[in-house]
Image (cartoon, rainbow, N blue to C red):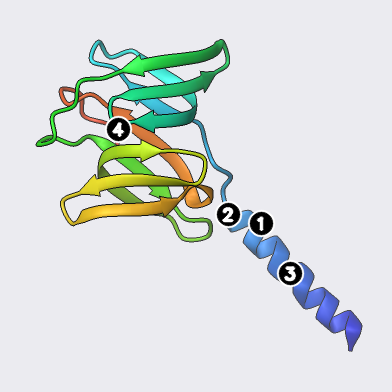
Amino acid sequence: MISKLLFVVTIVNLWLGTSMELPRNDLIILESGEKIEGHIQTILDSVIKIDTDHGEKTVIREVNIYSPRDIVETGIVMTKRHAGHVKYLGKDYLKIETSSGMFTIKRALVRKILIAHETVLPPLDL
């Protein structure tokens, strides 16, 4: 009986392990088209701090609230994308303003953040 249960648990773990993806590097696309990949530490309106392979960078962007270009991918097993303007990102949570309103998302559920300038269309394949 215990061996059957152990077998089922092992199969379920393998199945979940192959269908889940680990969080990926965040991406910032600047107005010039330059791409910065790394792990975004904080966002406070227009000031973004990101850790890259070459050290920590601070990016300041101009934001037009009528043309949001930020995409946040959330979820562990089932992923969901939110498009809008990221207002705040801290240790515990992220705030994004979308056409549906303001959302607060736990930082642990955020898989990837894509920040793009208003003149640049972000890629759809995150």
Label 2 vs label 3, nearer the camera: 2
Q: Report the amino acid beneath label 4.
A: Pro
Q: Quadrant of residue 79?
A: bottom left
Q: Report the amino acid beneath label 2.
A: Met
Q: Report which residue position mark 1 lands on.
A: 17
Name the residue located 47 percent from the left edge and 55 percent from the top edge.
75
Q: Report which residue position mark 3 lands on.
A: 11
Name the residue located 41 percent from the left edge and 15 percent from the top edge.
58
Element assignment for label 2: loop
Q: Residues within 10 Å of mark 1 (few under 14, many from 20)?
A: few
Element assignment for label 3: helix
Determine if residue 125 is in view: no
Determine if residue 85 is in view: yes
Q: Please, which residue is most extreme toward the left here?
A: 66
First of labels 3, 4 by sequence position: 3
Name the residue located 22 percent from the left edge and 34 percent from the top edge.
69
Separation of marks 1 and 4 at Cα, in angstroms: 27 Å
Q: Report which residue position mark 4 lands on.
A: 123
